[in-house]
Amino acid sequence: MRIGIISDTHGSPAAFRKALDVLGRCDFVLHAGDVLYHGPRNPLPEGYNPKELAEVINSIDIPLLIAAGNCDAPIDQMLISVPIQSPYTMLCFDNRRLLLTHGHEINEERLEELAARWKVDILVTGHTHVKNIKKLPGLTHINPGSCSLPKDEIPSVGLIDGSRVLLINLDTGQTLQTEELD
């Protein structure tokens, strides 16, 4: 199973297209929220065009799951034909349980406790715009960073490829971090 992980596009069609190009063919793609709007605290990403991004999202043939972020609004659903899920979306694949959420409603520690209580194997969050793969007993926590407005200066995406998870630099295609899934 090959699963692309994107977060915090904030209205940038160029960043979304680049993310899909770098990820290559995936069985499906997860978006951890903050899809169209840049938010009041963020600068405009280069090429900011939420309407165009919605059109790109609507045109892809890869199944896409979106968890609502703090910058996502009900009005966005009028443009995006893919359902924007509640802030928490559970996915089961290959005998694994994955929890997808933006991560803005409760802090990281409480999210990890919730994941443990729900016997989740993989927790995917966004929100911080900082990429990281954190290994805990029985849990892999993935934050792909932001593909449009990274706070650590490197636009990035995540990829679950079989039993590995990778963080990939969007500018170079270079793998930045790799971890094995439990």
Image (cartoon, grey):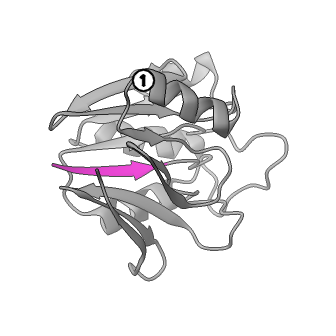
Give the quadrant of residue 17: bottom left
State the residue in front, 162 or 158: 162
Residue 29: give x, y in percent of width and height: 32, 44
**In the rendered structure, does residue 3 fall within the stretch colored magenta?**
yes
Q: Amino acid at mark 1?
A: Thr
Q: Name which residue lies at 38% across and 31% down.
A: 120
Q: Which residue is mark 1?
A: 89
Specify start and end residues of the magenta stretch as a single range.
Answer: 1-6
Residue 113, given in percent of the width and then of the height, sits at: 56, 29
Residue 18, position as x, y percentages in the image: 41, 65
> Relative to 9, is 98 above or below?
above
Per the picture, the main secondary structure of the magenta-coloured stretch is strand
Q: Residue 82: in sight, yes or no?
A: no
Disc 1: CA contacts within 10 A as few (<14), some (14-19) or many (>=20): some
Q: Is residue 46 magenta?
A: no
Q: In the rendered picture of this protein, how many numbered marks are placed on residues? A: 1
Quarter of the image where one finds residue 98: top left
Left or right: residue 83 versus residue 2 is right
